[in-house]
Amino acid sequence: MSGASAASASGVGAAGASAASEAPRVIRLLIADDEHLIRGALSALLNLEADIEVVASVDNGVAAAEQALALQPDVCLLDLEMPQADGIEAATRILSTVATKVVIVTRHARPGVLRRALAARVSGFVPKSTPAEDLAAVIRDVVAGKRYIDPEIAATALTADRCPLTDRELDALRFSRSTMSVQEIADALHLAPGTVRNYLSSAMTKLDARSRHDAADKAWQQGWI
């Protein structure tokens, strides 16, 4: 090979190496949303981004936690309202076992939900109305170690009432949103039935509720459970 040819080959090799080093890192994304059309649209639109690859798409919080553990994605995009485990419950499970970031999307952010999300170490909180290109930017930001909270959601959270309930009262009310009996709630919480009744009675008094189900509904409306 002549000196000119060698120099040319060397230049091409250097240019190729430089181009490879400048190629964007591909962000591996898991999406969880129980609304099939929204989940499909998000997957299709975000897959169009050169640096984002959707590696899993599921319809409930339990499956999200299982797939996150199996696939170790860089980011988990979770709907707030999902069956089996909501977005924050799923985030708590995922972040306890996987080195990833979580972004919550929601149609309606109840006042206290943001505090729960931040306590669960969620990195992003955005409305479902966020355009796909803006959502992609949020995903890149959280991978870079930043946190993004939608300004309107943050403003609502700042003006929300503080939760007057204890953690145990919240636990009892969370189960009261189902058809579980007091005995079944006690079994789930590993407490005596009388203790659970005391927690429920205290919560009802604090929330001026007619029943444990009414108290649970009020707590849910505030985003405390």
Image (cartoon, rainbow, N blue to C red):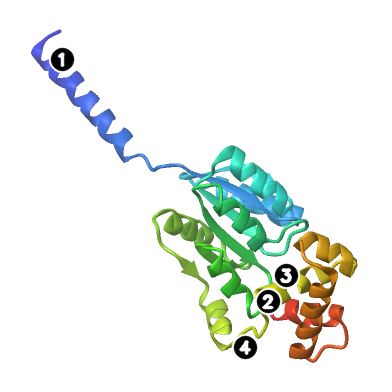
Q: Earlier in the sequence, mark 4 or mark 3?
A: 4
* Mark 1: amino acid: Ser
Gap between marks 3 and 1, in whole Å?
A: 74 Å
Tell me the quarter of the picture where residue 19 sits.
top left
Q: Give residue 5's mark.
A: 1
Gap between marks 4 and 3, in whole Å?
A: 19 Å
Q: Is residue 67 left or right of residue 29?
A: right
Q: Give residue 50's mark.
A: none
Gap between marks 4 and 2, in whole Å?
A: 10 Å
Image quarter (top left, top right, bottom left or bottom right) of the C terminus: bottom right
Q: Pointer 4: what residue? A: 161
Q: Pointer 3: what residue? A: 171
The percent position of residue 107, horizontal first and vertical second, equals 68, 70
Residue 224 visible from this viewpoint:
yes
* Mark 3: amino acid: Asp
Q: Is residue 67 above or below residue 173?
A: above
* Mark 2: amino acid: Gly
Q: Give residue 223's mark.
A: 2
Q: Tell me the residue at 88%/65% (across/down).
A: 183
